[in-house]
Image (tube, coloured by chain):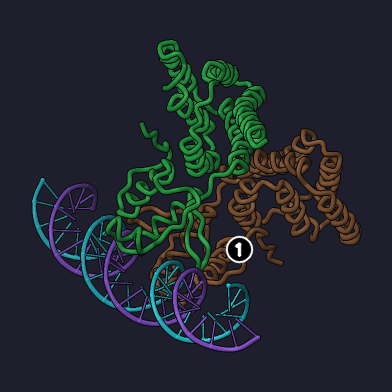
Chain colours: A brown, B green, C purple, D cyan
Amino acid sequence: MFLQNPTKQAAVTTADKVFEQLQHAIVEGDMAAGSKISEPELAKHYKISRSTLREALNRLEKCHLIERKANIGSRVVACTIEGLLELYITREALEGMACRQAALNMTDEEIAHMKNMLTQHAGDKALQDGVSYYQEEGDVDFHYKVILGSHNQQLINLICGQLYHLVRMYRCQFGMHSPRATRAFTEHSNIIQAISDRDGELAELLMRRHIAASRKNIENKIALQKAEQESQET
Amino acid sequence: MFLQNPTKQAAVTTADKVFEQLQHAIVEGDMAAGSKISEPELAKHYKISRSTLREALNRLEKCHLIERKANIGSRVVACTIEGLLELYITREALEGMACRQAALNMTDEEIAHMKNMLTQHAGDKALQDGVSYYQEEGDVDFHYKVILGSHNQQLINLICGQLYHLVRMYRCQFGMHSPRATRAFTEHSNIIQAISDRDGELAELLMRRHIAASRKNIENKIALQKAEQESQET
DNA sequence: CTCTTAAGAATTGTCGACAATTATACTTAG
DNA sequence: CTAAGTATAATTGTCGACAATTCTTAAGAG
């Protein structure tokens, strides 16, 4: 259920394990977004020393799940509309480029594997009427494979190692299950086709449109909510 | 001389200060790229405890200047051709988007300020025949202003807070003073014009070409060096 | 009653020591 | 002489305590 970051290695040290637990807690919202973090309290809760906890906190900061200020302390990152839209803008830039690079650098085996995955997802999609699976793991799975396919370590680290933790957090906390499954599936197919054709320019364009479409979907929703609120106020 | 990251605040804690010193040492090459880092040794050298040093190391890892492995230790990041090219690809994606956002979000004051800056650089450039100043701080200054002009905190943090430390490191270590000053100046002018026209699409395109041109410049140099080496070997 | 100020409590930053893991060097068998 | 295994040394991970800073609370002045 909890899709793992494909770039990370097994957690060997206790700080690693606590980091993973905290990461999970923050992403799922068990630790409220924007809330203050008490080092003594958390250390006691996980039965570890503050040094070890701080090591874990440093890793959380690395993937932008918490923010630290000197002599003040740490807070769980806040989930705001602006932050969400900024995240989409950034994803559009990075994943668009990753997709272009994937078209240039993916091996034929990797491409074949992606095509198989999509075919399988097509079955799931038909079966479940595009509601649950495809939107969750299937979508993330697709994006991860494209990113890894770029064979660009810099891009991979930035997107998978940092950005996607935030993406998952927003998905959980804002409960984003947009009704774009069928459309997203078509878009994914076209992207794979462009990659398969080694058409980097088109691949980037399609991926950017794919992500921009999600962003605009959110923006519309927000605008709608706003309008509703205002009509209720009167 | 040492252009500061515009996003950071004053270093208050000793870990901050040591971080800055280490950052400087790594960027300038005083600590060899790829070399192993001994925690006891470094701690002794800076006359601090290992805990404090590790705090500083964590921050270095955040901007990708060192790499850590559990139970093994830290190494200064290695400077490779592949890494440099990957960095340019990533910059092209991120700064291109930042430039598009800058065209949308910059205030008229910010734009006016950039135009002034460029005019002043034009003078410096004429004076010094485009050799030293403009290529160093002037160029970085221009890029920073565009990035900040995006008003997108996510992009700003990623580029200024992380990527540019690596950029500076590569510049220092590979001694990159490419003969592109005049051309770069023209490109900068065109970018500002596009931003001033609020033409986001063109602004992004021009910024991407500007960065891609630098990358191709490097690629050509590498290819040339390679050819020379091979001719000497025979 | 409000604002300022000062003392106290709590939190974060730093330190040195111990435990666990990894690297090194030596011994020994083949 | 080479190679594997073991013992030793060195390094990293974790811990609890102390120092420095910030937050809280209460007292007092206006």
Disc 1 marks a residue whose amino acid type is Glu
Image position, residue A60 (x, y; %):
51, 59
Q: Quadrant of the N terminus of chain B?
A: top left
- Decide: is A56 above or below B119: below
Q: Callout 1: few (<14), some (14-19), or many (20+) C-alpha neighbours within 10 Å?
A: some
- The residue sitting at 50% across, 27% down in the picture is B177
Q: Is any atom of residue A182 visible in this view?
A: yes
In the image, B29 versus A145, the foreground residue is B29
Image position, residue A202 (x, y; %):
80, 34
Q: Quadrant of the C terminus of chain B?
A: top right
Q: Is A163 situated left or right of D12 in this image?
A: right
Image position, residue B116 (x, y; %):
44, 16
Q: Which residue is mark 1?
A: A28
- Decide: is A201 above or below A117: above
Report the chain holding disc 1: A
Q: Is C12 situated left or right of A84 in this image?
A: left
Image position, residue B163 (x, y; %):
52, 42
